[in-house]
């Protein structure tokens, strides 16, 4: 007889532990941060009226009236005949995108598990939040690229730098004062806001860090060119072939976002089958989320392959998180001839 079989048991650390800390790391969302700052700022292109009407627009088109800039003719003689041109207006249709993630929890599998129910639910919510943020980041980059300026009236932009595919390209030798030129490039196209947003990929970071830390104690102080600049960084901007770093710069008020949830979530409806809708703020997401919740009896005996054969009739909880969002850029009646406030730049060898 021996007790050795029951003595040599595995030692197990309590969960949560710190060993999975890097596995569960989350990404930074510099594009989204930049867009939200401009949406909520005093110079926002999103008016309170537009925000209110957006929330109630499900099932209907949402249009924003805009005016085109007119052309004034200067005459050099007086005349008894007075003429004048007509103003020109247009409607901008708000384009919505619906995003949804689903979360399911088989509650019984946590009864005898080192991983606890609330921990795993919170983990799934955090991962859903990150996925939704990345989706919005990706769409923001697409919107910036589609609405970047095709016209530059600044000789700094056109003579000092190369313009390739509507993108300002600066060589390594030109980088020392590139961010100093940003304000002048904006000024030449009548964009005068002192607050300028710069969003770049991770390869822009070393350049900014280098110049912003060259203060008065250095041979050449280059901090002056960063006054009024708001820098954020993202992993959703890719470098093209032969490009060292890529980003966008724009004056405050160059992009905005709207959101809405389904009408059932707004109303807080409850169905006789136990389905419930609500509107919630979830930490990490910038907008209210429509939440649909239901629980049901389900056969989960085949879940994860083996070990849960006894769960032939168990409770499964389901959450569906969804909302609509729209990305807006300032109205431009003709991108081919009128400058846009959104400028794309690349640093090349």
Image (spheres, grey):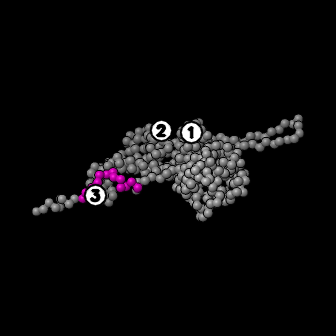
Query: Could you say which disc has been placed on residue 95 in the image?
Result: none
Judging depth in this view, the residue of 71 and 263 nearest the camera is 71
Q: Which residues are magenta?
A: 10-22
For the residue labelled by badge 3, is the local secondary structure a helix, a strand or a loop?
loop
Q: Nearer the viewer, mark 3 or mark 2?
A: 3
Q: Is residue 28 left or right of residue 71?
A: left
Residue 74 appears anywhere in the view: yes
Reading the image, the residue beneath label 1 is 51
Where residue 129 appears, x then y in whole percent? 45, 48
Work out which residue is located at the far top of the displayed protein and give it. Answer: 80
Where residue 249 appears, x then y in whole percent? 62, 50
Reading the image, the residue beneath label 3 is 307
Reading the image, the residue beneath label 2 is 266
Return the disc, 1 or 3, that comes first in the chain's sequence.
1
For the residue labelled by badge 2, is the local secondary structure a helix, a strand or a loop?
helix
Where residue 226 appears, x then y in whole percent? 60, 48
- The Cα atoms of the two marked residues, 1 and 2, are separated by 15 Å
For the residue labelled by badge 1, is the local secondary structure a helix, a strand or a loop?
helix
Locate the C terminus by quadrant.
Answer: bottom right
């Amino acid at each position: 007889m021996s007790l050795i079989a029951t003595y040599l048991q595995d030692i197990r650390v309590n969960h949560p532990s710190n060993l999975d800390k890097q596995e569960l790391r989350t990404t930074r969302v510099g594009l989204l941060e930049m867009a939200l700052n401009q949406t909520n700022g005093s110079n926002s292109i999103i008016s309170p009226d537009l925000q209110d009407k957006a929330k109630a627009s499900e099932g209907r088109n949402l249009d924003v009236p805009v005016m085109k800039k007119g052309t004034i003719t200067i005459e050099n003689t007086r005349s008894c005949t007075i003429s004048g041109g007509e103003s020109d207006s247009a409607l901008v249709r708000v384009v919505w995108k619906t995003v949804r993630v689903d979360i399911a929890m088989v509650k019984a599998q946590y009864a005898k598990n080192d991983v606890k129910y609330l921990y795993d639910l919170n983990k799934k919510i955090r991962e859903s939040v990150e996925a939704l943020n990345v989706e919005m980041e990706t769409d923001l980059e697409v919107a910036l690229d589609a609405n970047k300026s095709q016209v530059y009236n600044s000789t700094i932009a056109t003579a000092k730098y190369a313009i390739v595919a509507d993108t300002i390209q600066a060589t390594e030798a030109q980088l020392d004062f590139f961010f100093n030129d940003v304000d002048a490039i904006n000024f030449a196209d009548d964009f005068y806001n002192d607050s300028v947003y710069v969003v770049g990929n991770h390869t822009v970071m070393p350049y900014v860090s280098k110049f912003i830390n060259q203060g008065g104690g250095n041979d050449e102080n280059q901090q002056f060119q960063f006054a009024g600049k708001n820098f954020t960084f993202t992993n959703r901007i890719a470098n093209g072939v032969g490009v060292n770093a890529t980003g966008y710069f724009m004056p405050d008020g160059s992009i905005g976002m709207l959101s809405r949830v389904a009408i059932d979530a707004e109303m807080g409806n409850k169905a006789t089958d136990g389905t419930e809708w609500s509107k919630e703020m979830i930490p990490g997401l910038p907008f209210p989320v429509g939440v649909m919740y239901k629980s049901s009896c389900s056969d989960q005996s085949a879940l994860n392959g083996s070990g849960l054969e006894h769960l032939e009739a168990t409770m499964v909880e389901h959450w569906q998180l969804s909302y609509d969002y729209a990305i807006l850029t300032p109205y431009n009646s003709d991108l081919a001839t009128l400058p846009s406030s959104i400028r794309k730049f690349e640093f090349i060898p």
